[in-house]
Amino acid sequence: MSDAASDIARLRAALAASEARAEAAESELAQTRAVVSTSEAMIKHLRLEIAKLRREHYGHSSERRARLIDQMELQIEELEAAATEDEIAAQKVAKTTTVAEFERRRPARKPFPEHLPRERVVISAPTSCSCCGSDRIVKMGEDVTETLEVIPRQWKVIQTVREKFTCRACEKISQPPAPFHATPRGWAGPNLLAMVLFEKFGQHLPLNRQAERYAREGVHLSLSTLADQVGACAAALEPIHALIRTHALGAERLHGDDTTVPLLAKGGTRTARLWTYVRDDRPFAGGAPPAALFHFSRDREMAHPNRHLAGWQGILQADAYGGYNDLYRGDRDPGPVSRALCWSHARRKFFELADIKGNVRKGKPAHDISPVALEAVTKIDAIFDIERQINGLDATSRLAARQRLSRPLVEDLRDWMQAERDTMSRHNPVAKAIAYIFRADRWDAFTRFLDDGRICLTNNAAERALRGVALGRKSWLFAGSERGGERAAFMYSLIVTAKMNDVDPQAWLADILARLPATTASRVPDLLPWNWSPTRQRMAA
């Protein structure tokens, strides 16, 4: 019996030791997972910071960088969440507040904004000492823990009371006039209207989703009711849009571009177009404020740019789309438009051929890239480097720098591309990329920036204006009608122009909707984004 008892004791000890090792291994595995998750998040975060710093310092070194930064930010969100989950799991296993030999480094949190109201919640003080029970206790200080909280949106109904008075002498009844509403037969306040407009056109939240959210908050507004107010606001804002249109078309140089917009049609959708024309004189230190003008069309025929820019003459920076060709004709009335093409489009074709990572993703070997395309990207990037240095200088200084620095590089690039093209088949992808630049009279349009300091090297200003449309397509799916597309173009003109002037679009819309009914025609220009200043009452609110 003694031998059996000894064996049982030995087995129990071995089992306990095995369980201890298993717990230690499980704890170590959880710790390792937490370290790996945090390391991945930290590496991704550092890469994102490096990418942003490079973008700020060197500009757009590639066409894909902006999209890659957006993608990296989304990945960081997931990695940070995973790291937190793994850290909590490791703490539960290790039964400690921090994992052994590892503590996750968290970013330093900034203090809460001073302008936020503070609600002081004081925990009831003890009436006696917790140690001896004496009631002779006095306050010697306090520790404050701040917690950021949000109060759900509050709805309210404003009752404007107009009292009636009668005269005891003549019995005449008098009463103050009724207040103006932002829209005819209006029932909604300007802040509510601005919220509906900005969420629909600025945040790409369709009216049906807005109505559903309002209903969950206890306010039932039908889709037709909201749509009626959107149309009424568009009519009320027409004077502002007209002034923005006049200002944009008063420019000597415009950026032009277009993007696809799904349009609801019988049996499905068709591809419509949203056009933009951007005035932005900031690159050459121009004094005019920036503005964007949008138009909608059912197709991409060249009749649309002709109509949009009828009577306008100046420099048009755009891509090589043939729909603009009528604008460049010598017999055009009132005169031909000068053509300036975008070097980002020219570089993009070479970049795609020299993109090693892109080829690997497509299943091609990493070495299967074009050295000629890579050399072309290098040469074109040298021109972009000069542009980054002179961005924001006046037109005269920009022109002098281009004549001295950029022209030799451009001429060298032209001779090199022509020599390389002569050695290739015309079906070669690189030869096609070179032909894109030299086709017809494009070279003169590509090099027009060398003779005019106002011209930009790229058409990125127009592409930035259209970025919100591209992001919103997945949300609102399609334009419900041609009129709906035109209304969207109308509102995009207002919202994008406000953003270009560093004005909060929703606050601006709320204020001008409140002030427009009582504003004379001569004072309407004061409500434009670059002239606008919010009323003191709204600033206080």
Image (cartoon, rainbow, N blue to C red):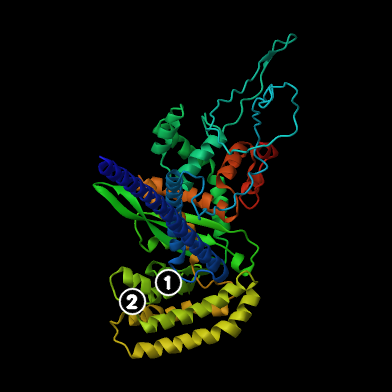
Amino acid of disc 2? Ala
Amino acid of disc 1? His
Residue 232 versus residue 49 in the image, above or below = above
**Circle number at residue 366:** 2
Could you say which is closer to the camera, residue 19 or residue 207? 19
Q: Are marks 2 and 1 in contact (CB under 8 Å)?
A: no
Classify residue 400 by image quadrant.
bottom right
Q: Residue tagged by mark 1?
A: 345
**From the viewer's perspective, is 182 left or right of 38?**
right
What whole-number distance in Å separates the C-alpha atoms at marks 2 and 1? 24 Å
For the C terminus, the image quarter is top right
Q: Residue at x 49, y 45 (%)?
A: 96
Q: Residues within 10 Å of mark 2 (few under 14, many from 20)?
A: few
**From the viewer's perspective, is 360 left or right of 132?**
left
Residue 257 in picture, x, y percent from top left: 44, 63
Classify residue 331 by image quadrant.
bottom left
Q: Helix or strand or loop: what does disc 2 sit on?
A: loop
Residue 70 shows in this picture: no
